[in-house]
Image (tube, rainbow, N blue to C red):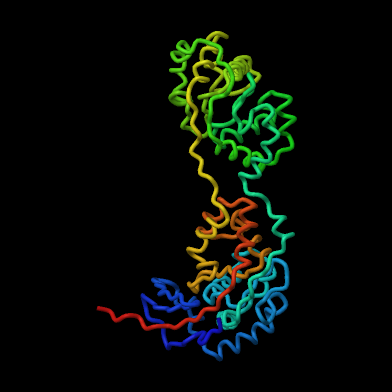
Amino acid sequence: MKRIAQFFPMKSLMAGLLGAWLATVGVAQTINLGSANVADFKVVYATAQDVVEGKRVAETMCVNCHGINGISVQKGVPNIAGQRPVYLHLEMKVYQVGGRGGNTMANTVKYMNDDAIMKVSAYYSSLEPAEGIVVSNAKSAKTKPDAISAGRAAAAACGGCHGEAGVSKTAGMPSLTGLDPKYFVAAINAYKGGQRKHDMMKALVSELTETEISNIALYYALQKAEKAGTPAVGNVAAGKTAAAGCVGCHGEGGVSGNPSTPSLAGQDSQYFAAVMRAYKDGSRSDATMKGPASSLDEASAKNLAAFYATQTPQSPKVGKPLSVAEWAERCDRCHGVNGNSTDPRAPALAAQRVDYLEKVLRAYKKGERKSKEMAVMSEGLDDALVDGLAIHYARQKARGISYLILPAPPTK
């Protein structure tokens, strides 16, 4: 869309409510700036002469990285043509005070005055934005599978012992469904670190990464929890009586309400009895379980095992991760439909470079780039989602935007 008017100057900024009509192909919105810093919005009032002078600043300070047209050709460097003006202005100020670290951008803007920052922001925001990219099949193929798919693939090697989808059909082998991911991860790491003595398990999990373990845990947590398909040996009634002392930690009927404590309902009885022996003889270390296990004889352990094996397991309360499309809907709340922000303070994401979007999302996730809102939003993103979101927004058509400043309504 060709913009018919980029900025309309006013002599002064009205206090309180600033009405800004923003149009992007039929979209109009009024932005309430509230108590926002007046100086940060000076760029919205830039004149045609300011834009011309901003181009001169860009020719001197910015072309090596961003080009005079604002379309980057360097890896990790963002496109800034058509970017929202207040966002550009605010970001440059953040770089100037060291809020993004001591990098090339920080060194470039370090000695720029407010007037130069305002004008160069006005210039780049006045340009036609980049076209949406066509992501190659090779790039798409390199993106990592989502956490559930990755977990399913990694768990395939576990099926021989623990049963399809984690429901054991082999006596002595535990079912893996019905366990909270937090407990599952802790248990695997205990095998990996040797706190749980089991040579075969240690060998099997030793090469698993933290992400792979988390993915497997999530996959099993989302499977339907079922009783192990193995016989229960022991007195169920006696086991029910003995289980009264276990409710505080493991829940009524063996369904735990604590993510760090395993559910016991539906678990294979032989495995359960073997674990109690391990706690008793110290081959599995846990200060909480050492006392209860020490007071159990073999018959009592089997009775407990039989009782819990007959109880109905429940899947833990774990939400299914959002898809890329679902995440994008959340991102669009601030960044506009398909990444075309209608708020001059919020960056447009449409047609942005894939590598830049990936870099920034990971920086927010790690806390290297500071933003309360983005820290919360990026916390739930795994590598596959970061890649997927970057590709999604890079493919979108970027739309220019026009600003018409309206007077504040009269006070009553």
Q: Quadrant of residue 14?
A: bottom left
Which residue lies at the image location 61% right of the left edge and 19% below the top edge? 271
Spot occupied by residue 78 in the image (x, y as percentages of width and height): 65, 70
Q: Depth check: 130 or 370 in front?
A: 130
Q: Depth check: 25 or 89 in front?
A: 25
Spot occupied by residue 185 in the image (x, y as percentages of width and height): 61, 35
Pick the quarter of the image with the N terminus. bottom right
Q: Residue furthest left?
A: 412
Spot occupied by residue 89 in the image (x, y as percentages of width and height): 55, 75
Q: Depth check: 14 or 158 in front?
A: 158
Q: Would you say residue 110 is visible in this rendering? A: no
Which residue lies at the image location 68% right of the left edge and 39% below the top edge? 154
Which residue lies at the image location 61% right of the left edge and 33% below the top edge? 165
Q: Would you say residue 263 is visible in this rendering? A: yes
Above or below residue 276? Residue 23 is: below
Above or below residue 84? Residue 293 is: above
Q: Quadrant of residue 68?
A: bottom right
Above or below residue 257? Residue 149 is: below
Q: Is residue 412 left or right of residue 36?
A: left
Q: Residue furthest bottom?
A: 49
Q: How many marks?
A: 0
Spot occupied by residue 58 in the image (x, y as percentages of width and height): 65, 82
Q: Is residue 386 left or right of residue 73?
A: left
Above or below residue 319? Residue 199 is: above
